[in-house]
Image: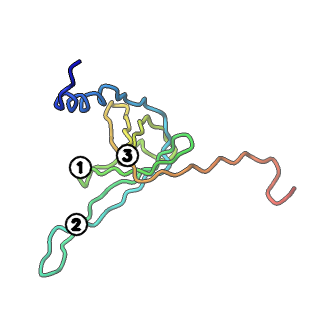
């Protein structure tokens, strides 16, 4: 029986994981909130004084079943915005990975968001028939 060379084992280790990797299916999520924010970035210093620029980004909160993902979208240009249909309560089709959310738009364009935080969604309270304060 021949032993595999180190080069062959190395190539197999590189090629096999992508062959078994499968894309997760898109699932329906609900947008909880969309906020435009900005970060201050230092461009350069003039006599120990920083010259800065504000870089805009969007913070998008999306709920999938019982988890809310807080993610960020950084536009390529400062004048770019998120789609108009991204409002609180609207549904989207997205795929969640470890660090990214890929949102598919109706125009087949996929937007990639970076996950910043995961948190449990507040459980929905069942409606009560009696007014509050009376038992």
5 vs 129: above or below: above
126 vs 3: above or below: below
| Residue 99, disc | 3
Q: Give whichever of discs 1 and 2 has the lower sequence position.
A: 2
- Label 3 neighbourhood size at 10 Å, few (<14), some (14-19), many (20+)? few
| Residue 76, disc | 1
Q: Give whichever of discs 1 and 3 has the lower sequence position.
A: 1
Measure the C-alpha gap from mark 1 to mark 3: 20 Å
Q: Are marks 1 and 2 in contact (CB under 8 Å)?
A: no
Extreme-left residue of the structure: 47
Extreme-top residue of the structure: 1
Q: Give whichever of discs 2 and 3 has the lower sequence position.
A: 2
The residue sitting at 37% across, 34% down in the picture is: 104
Measure the C-alpha gap from mark 2 to mark 3: 27 Å
Check disc 3 and report its element: helix, strand or loop: loop
Residue 86 in the figure: left or right of residue 15? right
Residue 129 in the figure: left or right of residue 120? right
| Residue 53, disc | 2
């Amino acid at each position: 029986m021949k032993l595999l060379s180190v080069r062959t084992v190395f190539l197999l280790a590189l090629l096999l994981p992508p062959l078994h990797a499968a894309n997760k299916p898109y699932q329906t999520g609900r947008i909880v909130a969309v906020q435009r924010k900005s970060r201050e970035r230092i461009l350069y210093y003039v006599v120990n004084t920083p010259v800065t620029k504000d870089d805009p980004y969007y913070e998008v909160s999306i709920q999938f079943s019982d988890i809310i993902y807080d993610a960020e979208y950084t536009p390529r240009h400062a004048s770019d915005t998120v789609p108009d249909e991204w409002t609180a309560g609207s549904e989207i089709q997205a795929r969640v990975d470890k660090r990214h959310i890929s949102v598919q738009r109706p125009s087949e364009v996929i937007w990639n968001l970076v996950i910043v935080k995961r948190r449990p969604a507040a459980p929905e309270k069942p409606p009560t028939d009696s007014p509050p304060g009376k038992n």
